[in-house]
Amino acid sequence: QVQLVESGGGLVQAGGSLRLSCVASGSIFRPNAMGWYRQAPGKQRELVATITSGGSTNYGDSVKGRFTISRDNAENTVLLQMHSLKPEDTAVYYCNAQVPFTGSAWGQGTQVTVSS
């Protein structure tokens, strides 16, 4: 069973930066795509960013130019560097991995709170 362990959330002032990390374990297969989604109270879960094993990236419109996703295939790790954070970025951030022969796996989530 694939396990995703996230770290790096916390409280930051508007304009600040945070870096989220997610490590995948439990499968012998490299995830095809890894990424981050977020869910704010009362809202649906939304795409933040994804990255394929080949390095192709996709970003949600609200984070383009401020967030950068990267991954280390050897370590099955995906990082999300967040700059110029805004109060509306406040949410629980979830790591996701698309694993061959397993499907979609989700982490437990990490809270990001941006104060104004």
Image (tube, rainbow, N blue to C red):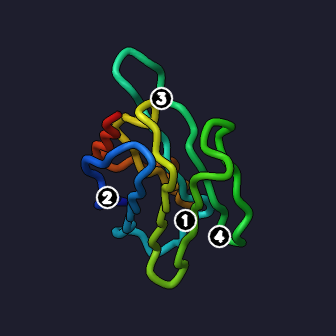
Instruction: State which mark lies toward you, 4 or 1.
Output: 4
Using the image, tell me which numbered label, if any, was put on residue 45. Answer: 3
The answer to which of marks 2 and 1 sits earlier in the sequence is 2
Q: Are marks 4 and 1 in contact (CB under 8 Å)?
A: yes
Q: Nearer the viewer, residue 14 or 5?
A: 14
Q: Are marks 2 and 1 in contact (CB under 8 Å)?
A: no
Look at the numbered disc 3 and give the secondary structure of its residue: loop
Q: Which residue is mark 2?
A: 6
Instruction: State which mark lies toward you, 2 or 1.
Output: 2
Label 2 – label 3 distance at C-alpha: 17 Å
Q: Amino acid at mark 4?
A: Ser
Picture layout, residue 18 above or below residue 109: below
The answer to which of marks 4 and 2 sits earlier in the sequence is 2
The answer to which of marks 2 and 3 sits earlier in the sequence is 2
Q: Amino acid at mark 2?
A: Glu
The answer to which of marks 4 and 1 sits earlier in the sequence is 1
Residue 114: give x, y in percent of width and height. Answer: 34, 40
**Quadrant showing the C terminus:** top left
Using the image, tell me which numbered label, if any, was put on residue 31. Answer: 1
Q: Are marks 4 and 2 in contact (CB under 8 Å)?
A: no
Q: Amino acid at mark 3?
A: Arg
Q: Nearer the viewer, residue 76 or 111?
A: 111
Label 1 – label 3 distance at C-alpha: 21 Å
User: Residue, x 70% and y 70% (percent of image)?
Assistant: 55
Q: Amino acid at mark 1?
A: Pro
Q: Dot 2, how many residues are within 10 Å of its Cα: few (below 14), some (14-19), or many (20+)?
A: many
